[in-house]
Amino acid sequence: MRKQIITDHRVPPSQPPEGSWLELDRIASVELTSEAEAHPIEAALTGTGEGWRAGVPGTQILRLRFDAPQRIRRVWLEIEERGTTRTQEMLLAWAPADGTLHELVRQRWNFSPDGSTCEKEDYRFDLENVMCLELTLQPDIERNQAVASLRRLRVA
């Protein structure tokens, strides 16, 4: 058993698990409802910087539109919140060429600076002919004043 005593209780930044990740910058375009200038969506998709952050509070939509139909087997994402206690709802959906959205996952996560500060999800699917992958984040279901963020998003 390997063991280490830790003094810093924060979770260190992590890398997504290994996989054959799609080069989203080459095969897809991104549509989004807003972004903060210092935290563009490219940071979440490429793993550089601190990830994406919305430019305004409230519900946000991030949509990946693929240039050609894709087979999607995996979606890995990381969301971090260290400053605000809030309950976030996340919805992940996909669409084939006809544009009809199909819900994959809907879940809530409770963030707390003194407890849970990082949500990491590793979803496995077997989807054919995916033309659109959509992530909807409602960062605070009670007050709707929080700003959504996404540290990392990978798709395989």
Image (cartoon, rainbow, N blue to C red):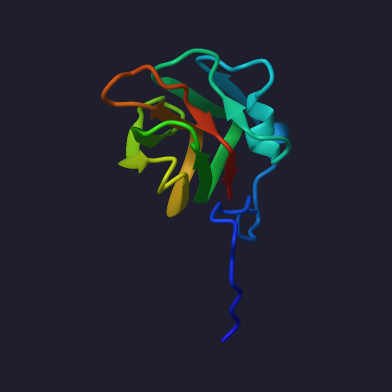
x and y, in percent, of residue 37 in the image: 67, 15
Q: The N terminus lies in which quarter of the figure? A: bottom right
Counting the numbered discs, the total is 0
Image point 37% across, 35% down: which residue? Answer: 90
Up-down: is 137 above or below 56?
Answer: below
Left or right relative to 4: residue 63: left
Up-down: is 13 above or below 41?
Answer: below
Image point 66% across, 35% down: which residue? Answer: 50
x and y, in percent, of residue 122 in the image: 48, 54
x and y, in percent, of residue 39 in the image: 65, 24
Say if residue 135 shows up in the picture.
Answer: yes
Q: Residue furthest bottom?
A: 1
x and y, in percent, of residue 24 in the image: 66, 37
Q: Residue furthest left?
A: 142
Identify which residue, 79 or 28, lies in the foreground: 79
Say if residue 106 shows up in the picture.
Answer: no
Up-down: is 93 above or below 17?
Answer: above
Left or right relative to 68: residue 56: left
Up-down: is 82 above or below 118?
Answer: above
Image point 29% across, 26% down: which residue? Answer: 141
Left or right relative to 42: residue 93: left
Identify which residue, 25 or 58, lies in the foreground: 58
Identify which residue, 70 or 155, lies in the foreground: 155
